[in-house]
Image (cartoon, grey):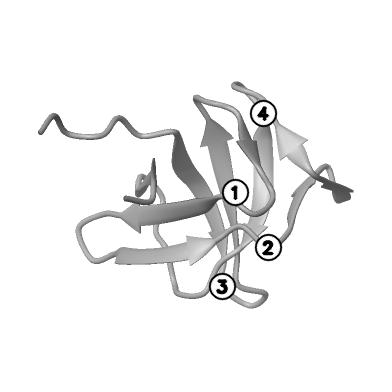
Amino acid sequence: MAEAKPIAEVTHYFDKIGVAVFKLKKAIKAGDEVQIRGNKTDFTQKIVSMQIDRVEVESAKPGDDIGVKVDEEVREGDKVYPAE
């Protein structure tokens, strides 16, 4: 099976509030399940809420930077994949 292509990359992580910034390569919407992977990161979670410029949105398109509350610590450069 071919390796899944990342749909986003983590560009920033706010550890005090547990929010990651994703730079999107593909469209995403609230309720989607994603897997976040990196050198020290590997977990799956549902996108419960996301924001663009501190405004809650239901979906986002490629090229958008979105803020997402994450369940675990992530690092800049971690890749975001659709959950299998």
**Pair 4/2: label in front:** 2
Q: Is residue 65 left or right of 41 when viewed as pictured?
A: right
- At x 57%, y 50%, the residue is 32
The residue pinned by badge 1 equals 21
The residue pinned by badge 4 equals 64
Please state which of residues 54 and 49 is positioned toward the viewer in this rendering.
49
- At x 83%, y 42%, the residue is 53
Q: Is residue 2 left or right of 67 when viewed as pictured?
A: left
Q: Is residue 13 left or right of 4 when viewed as pictured?
A: right
Disc on the earlier residue, 4 or 2 = 2
Separation of residues labelled 1 and 3 (CA atoms): 11 Å
Q: Is residue 1 left or right of 80 when viewed as pictured?
A: left
Disc on the earlier residue, 4 or 3 = 3
Give neighbour class at mark 1: few <14, some 14-19, many 20+ (Cα, 10 Å). Answer: many
Q: Identify the secondary structure beneath mark 1.
A: strand
Q: How many marks?
A: 4
The residue pinned by badge 3 equals 15
